[in-house]
Image: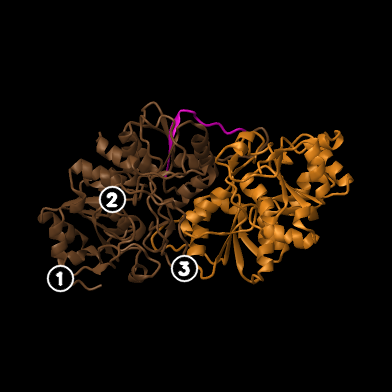
Amino acid sequence: MAPQLLSSRTFKSLFDSVDTFLFDCDGVIWKGETLIDGVSQTIDLIRSKGKNVVFVTNNSVKSRRQYAEKFRSLGLSSVTQDEIFSSSFAAAMYLKFNNFPKDKKVYVIGGEGVLEELQIAGFTGLGGPEDGEKKAQWKSNCLFEHDKSVICVGLDPNINYYKLQYGTLCVRENPGCLFIATNRDAVGHMTDLQEWPGAGCMVAAMCGSTEREPIVVGKPSSFMMDFLLQKFGTDSSRMCMVGDRLDTDILFGQNAGCKTLLVLTGVTSESDLLEKGNKIEPDYYTRTVSDITKLMDSPSK
Amino acid sequence: MLSRSVASAVSQVSSSTSALLPNSKQLFSFKTLCGYRSSSFCGGSIRKINHKPLRMTSSNMTTRAMASKQLENADQLIDSVETFIFDCDGVIWKGDKLIEGVPETLDMLRAKGKRLVFVTNNSTKSRKQYGKKFETLGLNVNEEEIFASSFAAAAYLQSINFPKDKKVYVIGEEGILKELELAGFQYLGGPDDGKKQIELKPGFLMEHEHDVGAVVVGFDRYFNYYKIQYGTLCIRENPGCLFIATNRDAVTHLTDAQEWAGGGSMVGALVGSTQREPLVVGKPSTFMMDYLADKFGIQKSQICMVGDRLDTDILFGQNGGCKTLLVLSGVTSISMLESPDNKIQPDFYTSKISDFLSPKAATV
């Protein structure tokens, strides 16, 4: 069935059929450091009607704790760390659930968020933003040391050749080395004014040199959904995934059997959604999250 | 100026992924120049590289049924062709060290009247700079005989009459800049952009020049987020902007001691952010083969491609319809060649090119 524009009638039936709303963040709640209009009131309204609210973001630059701070600084102080599921957290949980030995080290091509989540989970993460200052030496007889057993790749605005080389050698030469990607989003709204290359870029760089595919822990992979379902003990059919990106958010929701709602405040426009080549169709779409507030109050037609 | 036959050879290849140029009738109607990539065989975990196979211009690019034969009669091979195309890293030299027996071998082939050509995917140097490297190593090689992927990028732009009033953004090293300059193209970027930082903060908008008509991506040790974003903006927002890759080698031998992440990494990054496939001018794409066949008036069946890498050198030769000889003096070992995962079988293999000097039964 083609995606339906959310109306007061369809909204009421959607709202009554779900207990939990899963929200993506970039392009849905905020754009860079700017809150999208009306979001705060809408989240409060949804909670006041007895529904649960959870935030699932592929952006691995921050930890859950840092995201809770961001929510607070934008005026959404009702959001707690326990309601936030970032791909940085997912990477650490993946290693934990797979009983990855705590004495082995992880090399991080990404932000502080991943390093912090690894530390909280009891792992040793090295690399991260400070390796943005390092330069490789290509002298004869000078070997590049590389002893890590996991390479975790996420969004990294401090990407450089040193990190690519480090990660490449570990994956190609250290037996059993895991290659994990927090996510593969091509671009995102890292600032409010334009899109920027996402983790998909760094991950593809590593695929290009290692000739291997990574284990992806973020959307649309089901890892975070399985984690959420287990944690909340809920049925995916009673959940609605709200996101701005078809190939991560909407696919993530569909793969698990959730209802899906696309908003147009992020990377996807109405014409992107409706064009012939698009194969991913959410159940519903609407312009912005705050339409939920308008539709809640308006009489059903 | 390159003839239209090369242009039309290139136009036959296609893939469905990249955006068509709006004025493609004036230039080419092709979509990509990706080389066909088979599964990797680099040891450790193997994966199938996710390229769409390309319709090749001449030879059948599917797996040759016959396993590669050890070269036993070098004279017979030498007599059967007019031209030898040599890869450089792992065939002629390793890092800055000449491989044993190379000067005598090249001299012998020249004495037999064979044309010698050197084709390398390494884009860090220009042809002139490679000429100097050959000279330093005591080899008698003319700049006109050298075809680096840096040269290929410039030659490609010339072949499609890329307008001289448009600019080229370069994510790569000096070799590319030098070749573009020689060909009369305006460029931006290169190693200097490695110093540029960006700060992702509210209200910050990264601008980019709207007259950039092509982004050329190659091996780049000064790679950073600024360049990735600049290239991405040009490709996504400048109508008809070309996305050209010098090559997609996963790893390269920068030093003789170990492998280093190669151009495939930088190109991968741009593919990841633009979700477009590039036009690849280096091996295994046949662009350089078509160029030099046209330039020197050689029949491809009269060429033997000699290289150390199966998924670039040997595939390049096979795609071009040439004879192929793998040498084991570089990145490929005999076990990699014989592995069941390997689908690329050269006609012959031998330990190094100086095996040509002992015409019969060189030991591997």
Viewer-proximal residue, B23 or B236?
A: B23
Seen at 17% across and 64% down, the residue is B356
List x then y, in percent, for residue B34. Answer: 39, 48
Report the amino acid beneath label 2.
Answer: Val
Q: Which residue has dot 1 on it?
A: B360
The magenta segment = B205-217
Marker disc for residue B263: none
Q: Chain of mark 3?
A: B
- Image hue for chain A: orange
How crowded is the residue under tag 1: few (<14 C-alpha within 10 Å), some, or many (20+)? some
Secondary structure under tag 1 reads loop
Q: Which amino acid type is shown beneath numbered disc 3? A: Gly
Viewed as shown, does residue A125 lie left or right of B334? right
Which of B47/B107 is in front? B47
Marks 3 and 1 sit apart, C-alpha to C-alpha, by: 35 Å
Q: Which chain appears brown?
A: B
Residue B119 badge: 2
Q: Is residue B318 above or below residue B276?
A: below
Residue A273: horizontal and vertical position, in percent?
62, 39
Q: Residue at x 61, y 37 (%)?
A: A274
Which amino acid type is marked by label 1? Lys
